[in-house]
Amino acid sequence: GQQVMQIPQYQHVQEGEDFTTYCNSSTTLSNIQWYKQRPGGHPVFLIQLVKSGEVKKQKRLTFQFGEAKKNSSLHITATQTTDVGTYFCATPGGSNYKLTFGKGTLLTVNP
Amino acid sequence: DVKVTQSSRYLVKRTGEKVFLECVQDMDHENMFWYRQDPGLGLRLIYFSYDVKMKEKGDIPEGYSVSREKKERFSLILESASTNQTSMYLCASSSGGEKLFFGSGTQLSVL
């Protein structure tokens, strides 16, 4: 099935610093979704990107889908302690409704 | 709001026991999924179902089976639990190729 590599695995930042996680594939992706999992919680959907070169923003979060639709990124500007958690990318693999997840990036923020 | 309910938050079982994990969703979603989450390995798909009585293997189906007799309920069965099945199990549902809604998870310990 479709595989996505997510980097970095861990990221520790000082509050106020920026943060970026990347999702890369060797093949073209039909779409990509991003999820956030707070410590002790379950993954919660953030956004879906479908179009080549698409950029979407949610407050301090900026999501990008590459021109070749082989990579995606999530950038957080001026991190806050509430941003702590694991961020996952996910993409359909094999069939449209079966999602394959990246291994996630654990973000910790030092206040 | 969509609600995906998993029957137990924590479960402790003995090696060789038959284990049932239950999941119920209230949004009439066609698709339901079982993932397991382990540190450093992210979310791995065990089985999914796209309709009543229909199922497909995910990436790690060995040692598991599933049942979907009613649209709202998707059960994960460990026929003979083993210690390497100690994990966090997450159920999810979706409609079409849309976002996944996750339950709160069941932390299963097999002793």
Image (tube, rainbow, N blue to C red):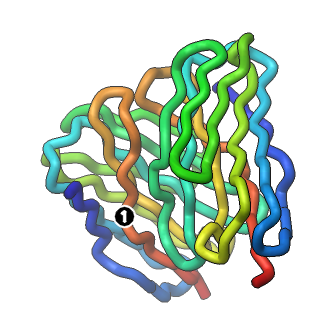
**Residue A65: x %, y % from top left:** 66, 25
Which chain is mark 1 on?
B
Q: Residue B85 versus residue A75: which sits nearer the camera?
A: A75
**Residue B92: x %, y % from top left:** 38, 52
Q: Is residue B46 visible?
A: no
Q: Residues within 10 Å of mark 1 (few under 14, many from 20)?
A: many
Q: Is residue B48 left or right of residue A88?
A: left
Q: Is residue B21 left or right of residue B45?
A: left
What residue do we see at 46% from left, 62% from top? B90
Q: Residue B79 versus residue B22: which sits nearer the camera?
A: B22
Q: With respect to residue B92, does B50 lie above or below?
A: above
What residue do we see at 63% from left, 41% from top? A62
Q: With respect to residue B15, does A25 lie above or below?
A: above
What residue do we see at 61% from left, 88% from top? B111
**Residue B101: x %, y % from top left:** 36, 52
Q: Is residue A15 left or right of residue A90?
A: right
Q: On the image, which quarter does residue B104 sit in? A: bottom left
What residue do we see at 66% from left, 30% from top? A64
**Residue A97: x %, y % from top left:** 41, 29
